Each structure stands twice: as structure tokens, then as C-alpha cells.
Amino acid sequence: MESTAKPVDRETLYNEVWTEPVSVVAPRYGLSDVGLAKICRSLAIPLPSRGYWAKVKAGKVMHRVPLPPLKHSGAVPTGLVKLPSEKVAVREAARKTAARVRKEVPPLPPPEEVGTPHSLVVATSKRLRRREGWPEGTMLRSAPKEVLNLSVTKDALDRALALTDALIKALEKEGFSFEIDAEKGATWVKWLETGTKMAFAISEHVKRSVHVVTPAEERARKRYWDRSRWDHAASYPSIPQHDYTPTGTLTIEVGRWPSRKWNDTPRTQLESRLGEVVGGVIVLARDIHAKEQEEARRKEAYRLAVERYEFLTTRHADEVARFEALEADAANWERAAKLRAFADAKERQLRAVGGPSAEQADWLAWARAKADWLDPLVLVSDVILDAPEPKRPGYW
């Protein structure tokens, strides 16, 4: 895999942004053109003015704005590292797909023009429209272990369901599916081509404010204090600490690490940005898949490194053991030779004085037998020394 681990310096980046448009250079570093432009400004790297590249394309000779010097001399690192060519290709493909989807996916049509809802949306609608079983405080309705992960109030439910239905249908056309994970209480968007899964949720922002005690609650509290003097069974009135106000502002969140969010703004609602959301989900899926592949590559590289380490350490240990055995055999061979030489010398001494006697002959045979047992080149066993160690008797 091609990789450039060394960050580019300031002058190199300057030459790049004056050779090609920022929109072309930025993807090489995994950045948007806006992000790269910010980095250039922070490094005092001038950028071509608006219309510069159109004039170059028209054949006009344009002049570069010189790179201003900084206070300190020498190469100034930018911290930017070029992505491998494979990642650049994946990001470019995702960008083109997202651009196509933004154009093709229309805004959400009026309710009367919407066809039959998706089966998951029908089940979600049925479950979240139940009258009972919802918290009184936030008023949010949600059952992620049973149906799609929506967390909205009753008034925003129709909008959330319509948005979800449109997203599911649009994403299914692009090769995605939706799954409900009852065990984890999550909804997954699955890219069928790779199996990549991303968490999906739509939530409504509910504004929380400190509760101001109402006159009725104040009267109830006063009645409690008056009654509690003689009635110890009286219960304190339930007065909330906070008030919750639905805003109708919806947020679509896909993925976790990384993730993308889209929400209503004062100027535009999510219904008019379906193409942007679908395109963003596609880009996110490709980014997550690339991250998963990189993580798998890193794990495989680590596994191979561990395997190599274990092989080398085992080989080293085996080699040390073999060498130690060799040294031991050589030492025992020398010891055996010394024993034989000693036995021969002893025999010569005994013969010089008329021996050896029967007892001395037995000793010489015993000494030579021990030398043979010690000698690694002689394959013999000793009845006593090679016998198993006797077991100490227990007390009974």
C-alpha cells in the first residue's frame, strides 16, 4: 500500500495549491477545500483568487502571488500527510456518488403523493402511536428494541415517520438496508456491498427549563403543610423540577465513530435536504468501510508481527537449548575421558605392585562403567543413576 508518512512542508503545499485548484488538492489529504484553505491561511500560504483557474483554462498567463517568508528559516512542516492512492480513489468515488444522489433524490413530496409506507415504518407508526406507556416529563416516544430508533413527541411523529420512510426507500435504491437490533436497542443501516453497519436515529430536540411553581401547585403545597400537622399519612404534592417544551426540530444521526448529523435549521427543514442526507450516508459508509479495512489490515499486520516474534523467540530459545546441550555433551565427554584416563592410571599403579585384586578389579570396572554412562557417545544406561527417584514413604 502506497503511503507518505512524512508531512509535506509549507513550500510544497504552496506549489500544489498554485498548480491545481484547492478542490483537487484537498482530497489528497482527506480534507475538504474549505478545510485545506483554512490550513493554508494559518500558514500564511496565499491562495489563487476567485476566477483564477477559469482564466488559466482560457489560456491567459497568470502570475503567482509569492510565498511570504516566515520569521524562522528552513522548511516549515504543515502536519498534512498525503493519503494512499487507494483511499483517494475511494473518497473520490464516494464524492461523485454523493453528488449524483443529491441531484437525483427529490425533496420529500406532500403526504398525498407518498405511496405505501415501508413495512418498518408501518410497524414503527403502530407502536409509537400507543396512548399509554410514555414518560410524562420529556413526552418523547421511543421503543428502539422493538421498532425503528425514533425519539420524538406525538406532534412530530408524522414528520419523523415520513422522513424515515423517504430515507429508507432512497437508501434501498443505493444498496442499503435497515435492520432493528432488539438486543442492543439500535437501528442499523447496512451497506449490502460490504456489510458495513451504521447506527441510525431520528430525534427531536425538547427544550428543558426550570419549572416555575404554579398558583395551583402552591395551594396544593400549602394544603399539605396545613394537613400534615395532624395527618401524618398526607403525601407531598408532586411538583416537577423542570418543564419540557417540544421544539419540533428534528435531527438525523447516522454512525457513531465517525458519525454524521443533519438537523432542521431556521432556514431549511430536513424534508428539502433528503438528497444531501442520502449522499452523506453513502460517503460515511465508504469512510467507515475504509476505516474497517484499515483496522483489519492493522490487526493482520499485528498478528503477523506477533507470529514472527514468537517464531524468532522460540527459534532463539531452541537454539540456546541445543547449544547448552552441546556444551553439556562436550563437557561430559571430557569428564568421561578424564575418568577413563584416571582408571587406566590407577590400573597401571596397581599392576606395578602386583595387583589388581578382585575387589580392585571390580572398582576399575565400576569406574569405567560410570565413564561410559557419562560419555554422550556411548549409549548405555546406569541401573542406579537412571532409576526413578524413590518415593518417600508416608506416615500411617
Image (cartoon, rainbow, N blue to C red):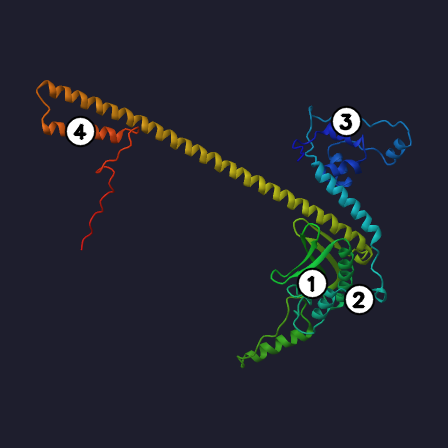
Residue 148, numbered circle: 1
Of the residues under marks 2 and 1, which one precedes in the sequence? 2
**Disc 4 marks which amino acid?**
Ala
Quarter of the image with the N terminus is top right
Asked whether disc 2 touches disc 4, contact meaning CB atoms under 8 Å apart, the reply is: no
Q: Where is mark 2, residue-wise?
A: 116
Of the residues under marks 3 and 4, which one precedes in the sequence? 3
**Disc 1 marks which amino acid?**
Leu
- Report the front residue among 141 and 139: 141
Q: How many C-alpha atoms fall within 10 Å of the one at disc 4: few (<14), some, or many (≥20)?
A: few
Q: Where is mark 4, residue-wise?
A: 365
- Look at 69% across and 36% down and name the residue there: 84
- Look at 25% across and 26% down and name the residue there: 336
**Disc 2 marks which amino acid?**
Thr
Q: Whole-Å distance between the Cαs marked 1 and 3? A: 56 Å
Q: How many C-alpha atoms fall within 10 Å of the one at disc 1: few (<14), some, or many (≥20)?
A: many
Residue 38 visible from this viewpoint: no
Residue 68, numbered circle: 3
Q: Whole-Å distance between the Cαs marked 4 and 1? A: 93 Å
Q: Is residue 162 above or below residue 94?
A: below
